[in-house]
Amino acid sequence: MFNRLLFFVYLLYCFEVGLFLMIFPWLELWDQNSLLNYLSSPLREAVLSNYFRGAVSGLGLANVTLGLWEVLRVFVLPQRSAKSGDSLRHLES
């Protein structure tokens, strides 16, 4: 039971962080971040560039993909191979 709970918390984490990292760099809040005031000018320009924003969004996409892969691995793939039983049985041990 505890392993199932940890698995669902992990999935929630993957999707939440992934969506945040995909969306947040493109909002105005990214430009208004007070931590940018402490960076040197070249580093600040790099953080505000579209290339850096795209890289951060790519990390978010990787997180969401990891979450989807875990859902497939636990719920879909065991059903194809076993065709019976609880699909979360390996999480209970």
Image: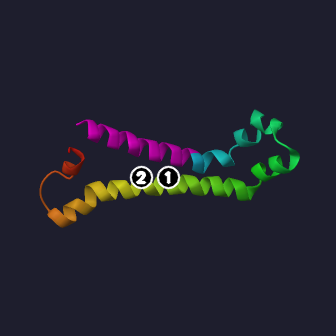
Which element type, helix, strand or loop, lies under badge 1? helix
Q: Are marks 1 and 2 in contact (CB under 8 Å)?
A: yes
Give the colouring mode of the picture: rainbow
Q: Is residue 73 above or below residue 88?
A: below
Q: Could you tell me residue 23's position as x and y percent?
A: 60, 48
Residue wearing tag 2: 67
Write down the region rendered in magenta. 1-20
Q: Position of residue 19 (x, y in %)?
A: 53, 47
Can you identify the residue that label 1 sits on?
A: 63
Which residue extends farthest top?
34
Numbered label attached to residue 4: none
Distance (Cα) linking label 1 and label 2: 6 Å
The quadrant of the picture occupied by the N terminus is top left
What's the residue type where badge 1 is placed?
Answer: Asn
Residue at 42%, 52% in the rendered image: 67
The residue positioned 87% from the left and 46% from the top of the image is: 41
In the structure shown, which secondary structural element does the residue marked by tag 2 occupy? helix
The vertical placement of 70 against 20, above or below, is below
Q: Is residue 16 left or right of residue 5?
A: right
Quarter of the C terminus within the rendering: top left
